[in-house]
Amino acid sequence: MKGLKTTDLQVGTGTLAEHGMNAVVHYNLYLPQGEECASGVLCICVGGDRQTYPTVTEGILGMRVGGKRELKFGPQLAYYEHRQNPSIPKRAALRYEVVLISLEPGFGRPTPCQAQ
């Protein structure tokens, strides 16, 4: 994804995240000044869920379970004018820190969160 910069903060030792797998990730979202504005757990399709958190779904490709990665991106990949969280300024460059918790086969199978 053009404009997305990834940096491994800790390389995991588990399964490799490949396109189409279902993933559970913990995330922290930071504003440009470094202030945390959101955190939580996402259940997503690796490299495929472009409607929800496209920077995260693309950013975890190639990670291994247990790994931690920083994802930096500009407003063109963030909310730009259409922010969903009022604490995020319009046209803000954002930074995620994500930890890949688990992976399962995907494409039509229930996500790990749905299976619980």
Image (cartoon, rainbow, N blue to C red):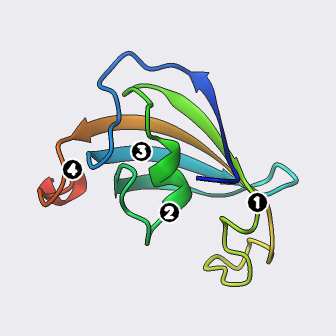
Numbered disc 3: secondary structure: strand
- Sequence order check: which comes first, mark 3 or mark 1? 3
Numbered disc 2: secondary structure: loop
Are the two marked residues, 2 and 1, in contact with CB atoms closer than 8 angstroms?
Answer: no
Q: CA distance from mark 2 to mark 1?
A: 14 Å
Question: Residue 25, which numbered label?
Answer: 3
Q: CA distance from mark 3 to mark 4?
A: 11 Å
Quarter of the image holding residue 69?
top right
Q: Nearer the viewer, residue 49 or 12?
A: 49
Q: Is residue 52 left or right of residue 24?
A: right
- Sequence order check: which comes first, mark 3 or mark 2? 3
Q: CA distance from mark 3 to mark 2?
A: 12 Å
Crowd band around label 2 with a 10 angstrom C-alpha radius: few (<14), some (14–19), many (20+): some
x, y percentage for residue 12? 44, 20
- Sequence order check: which comes first, mark 4 or mark 2? 2
x, y percentage for residue 66? 41, 25
- Sequence order check: which comes first, mark 4 or mark 1? 1
Crowd band around label 3 with a 10 angstrom C-alpha radius: few (<14), some (14–19), many (20+): many
Count of numbered labels shown in the rendering: 4
Residue annotated with mark 2:
53
Quarter of the image holding residue 103?
top left
Question: Residue 74, which numbered label?
Answer: 1
> What residue do we see at 29% from left, 25% from top?
15
Q: Is residue 1 left or right of residue 67?
A: right
Q: Is residue 110 left or right of residue 37?
A: left
Q: Amino acid at mark 2?
A: Tyr
